Image (cartoon, rainbow, N blue to C red):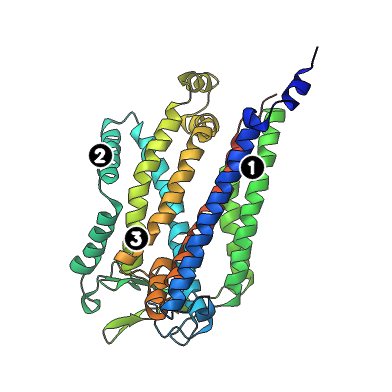
Amino acid sequence: MNSPDLTRSAVPFWNDPDKRAVVYQILALGMVGLLGYYLFSNTLANLERQSIATGFGFMDKEAAFEIGESPIPYSAAHTYARALLVGVLNTLKVSFIGIIFTVLLGTFVGIARLSGNWLLAKLSGIYIEVLQDIPVLLQLFFWYTIFYEILPSPRQAVSPFAGVFLSNRGLVFAVPHYHPVYALMGIAFLAAWAGVFLLRKWARRRQERTGRLFPVIRVSLLMVLGLPIGVWIVGGAPLSMSVPALTGFNFKGGMNISPEFAALLLGLVLYTSAFVAEIVRAGIQSVSHGQTEAAMAIGLRPGQILNLVILPQALRVIIPPLTSQMLNLTKNSSLAVAIGYPDFVSVANTTINQTGQAIEGVALIMIVYLCFSLLTSLFMNWYNKKMALVER
């Protein structure tokens, strides 16, 4: 009697479905490769025929255009590479700050949507429905128009507090003059958060071992606020401030939050937080009501029930769709070009218009946003894995 392996080896490969599948995949891969080679060679031939230079050699040339906002020193005399770096940093700034405010606001609205207070629940529902149904680009135009058409000029700027001015040029407020101690305060602030992370782990193990609660929140606030303040006091407690003053048609000194940045941040946060609120609401409702009843039965307060029982379980449902909303916010930041904020897409478009390197410019845009998305997904996947239930 022949074994199945000997019988299969005697079958011609065109009658063996496994071998045919391998051949079909090789043929499909070869066709895709040929198509890609044809498109690439055809593009190079057309560019050469029209005398259009290719490559990234333009990156070292002088940019010759100004950028309205830059977190690093920049002028028109810098290179295109420097200009594109400014665009990347501007995109990172609005995306990072936007994600933080979106998560905080979306979580608050999502919890308020489930509140027993009728008015609060209805207002949260209206917030979600209205902001979800208005396209984000229209929201950006709306806030941009509000800042430029309703707010007064710098000479008639509104000053709600001393050293703070609000006009159609943005929000200007006093900030401390540079001092080396502020860098040390930043390091102390990060070190305090690292200490908070270790403290929470220790407090959790202590509670599991002894059943006693540790005042983590109060101690954490003391560490996060007290350590930088202590460094500031030891460093001489510098108090010199850069106060904005009206000079000509605009303010000088202090820090300025431009209308473009404010409109972009506000539009992205309000739009995305409406979706995050629904994600949070669904995550909380996915936790069995019996969990809440059990927590109440052992004497936990409402705040403790939400923090210790409901949210840790809801996070396992919340994190995957929340990751998608973070990615959407980062990608939607490319709409900044519509209201004049110099994000990466805006700077890259200006570079393309001046150099004619359209293929390279678009390729850079794709690569940068791909990197942003992959890094965000990598971090959130790690956090999701950390929060997953551990099976025994």
Q: Quadrant location of residue 261?
A: bottom left
Mark 3 or mark 1, which is nearer to you?
3
Q: CA distance from mark 2 to mark 3?
A: 25 Å
Secondary structure, mark 3, is: helix
Quick check: marks 2 and 3 in contact, CB under 8 Å? Answer: no
Identify residue for label 1. 200
Q: Indicate left or right for 348 with 237 as reference.
A: left
How many neighbours does mark 3 have within 10 angstroms: few (below 14), some (14-19), or many (20 or more)?
some
Identify residue for label 3. 335
Looking at the picture, which amino acid does disc 3 mark?
Answer: Leu
Residue at 38% x, 40% y is: 277
Could you tell me if residue 148 is visible in this image? yes
Residue at 26% x, 34% y is: 122
* Marker disc for residue 322: none
* Marker disc for residue 126: 2
How many neighbours does mark 1 have within 10 angstroms: few (below 14), some (14-19), or many (20 or more)?
some
Looking at the picture, which amino acid does disc 1 mark?
Answer: Arg
Residue at 30% x, 34% y is: 121
Q: Indicate left or right for 116 with 201 as reference.
A: left
